[in-house]
Amino acid sequence: MLDFRLYDYLDTQTSVTVIADSTSSLTNSRVTTMLCRVPEIILPQLNTHRVFSRNVASNRAKRFSVNAKNMTYKPAIWLENHKGMQSEKLLPEWKSWIANIIWGSSKISSYIHGYLLDKLGVSKQYSNRVTTPYRYTDYLVTSSSWDNFLYQRDDNAAQFEIQVVARKIKQALEKSKSVLLKQDEWHLPFVTERDKIALPAFKQIQVSVARCARTSYSTPKNSLGMKDIYNKDIALYDTLVNSRPPHLSPTEHQLLCEWPNVATSRSNIKGFTQFRKILESTQFNQERVNQYVEKTI
């Protein structure tokens, strides 16, 4: 069987960036949040891993013209047709050359058809689907349990593209220095030291939730002042949490270092209390949520 690791260097667009990395001083559990840029075709495989909390750039939220800029995916290697799920042979070089031409032609065709649907006034949730096989997307993931994912996906039997993601995640975990959290301290992706100085604890959480959601939603313009950016973050948090039904996946990345309790401990993240569980256990009562968070200050 091919050793696919030899071809990782050909994939120049897949990337993994550690956003936050924390270890609980109470349970010794380590949790890491990463922002991954991955081919959209492997999202179904990533989403089978139930221990992950995730947010993904949305086909329904972004304009066709914005999503079209991400149409840069083509297979880094071409494999021969085969029985079963994984091929053991590369296509000959001349066939790979032709395959690249065919793939490029199909990408142009899909763009034209998506563009025409967009100009016709069709909803972006349809026009964007036409170009899905050719796009990269941003995938935000938080987990305290990476071993099974790495065992399953950093393996020659896995699709090459997800092998690359797994190996980059493994390298990121090995290189990252985890921050030791004391009791009642928070793991808050996208919250900077500047934010922590400027904002009380609950607003830090709201800002983190909004910024995690923006793998799906637009980002405030850099020309805005920090106060305006915070206001937009908090407004997005309110929209997510107070809508009916609420949109709670972005609230799974904020994690409290505390001893587990019955009301909040049942989650896919081990050794921490997930902010989503705090919301649910307090039945979204704003005053009770504030009280829970304030006791951690």
Image: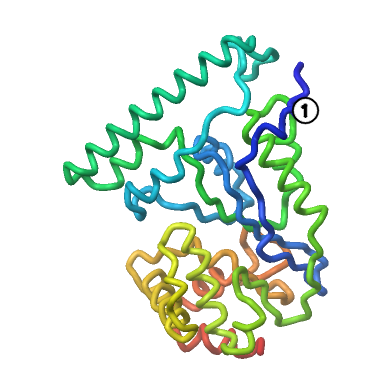
Q: Inspect the image, locate mark 1, and give the three-letter code of the amino acid beneath it.
A: Leu
For mark 1, does the 10 Å Cα neighbourhood hold few (<14), some (14 to 19), or many (20 or more) residues? few
Q: Is residue 241 left or right of residue 44?
A: left
Q: Nearer the viewer, residue 1 or 106?
A: 106
Q: Is residue 79 above or below residue 283?
A: above
Question: What is the x, y in percent for residue 47?
Answer: 55, 44
Relative depth, front residue between 216 and 266: 216
The x and y percentages for residue 164 are 68, 37
Residue 78, image x, y percentages: 60, 19
* x 33%, y 27%: residue: 109
Q: Give the colour scheme shown.
A: rainbow
Q: Is residue 285 visible?
A: no
- Residue on which the image places disc 1: 6
- Residue at 32% across / 52% down in the picture? 63
Inspect this view and state whether residue 286 appears. Answer: yes
The count of marks equals 1
Left or right: 126 as drawn, with respect to 84: left
**Is 143 situated left or right of 71 in this image?**
right
Q: Identify the residue at image location x=68%, y=12%.
A: 89
Q: Secondary structure at mark 1?
A: helix
| Residue 198 horizontal side relative to residue 88, left or right | left
Q: Residue at x 65, y 57 (%)?
A: 34
Residue 198, placed above or below residue 3: below
Which picture quadrant has residue 233?
bottom left
Residue 217 place in picture, x, y as percent: 41, 61
Quarter-wise, where is residue 183 in the image? bottom right
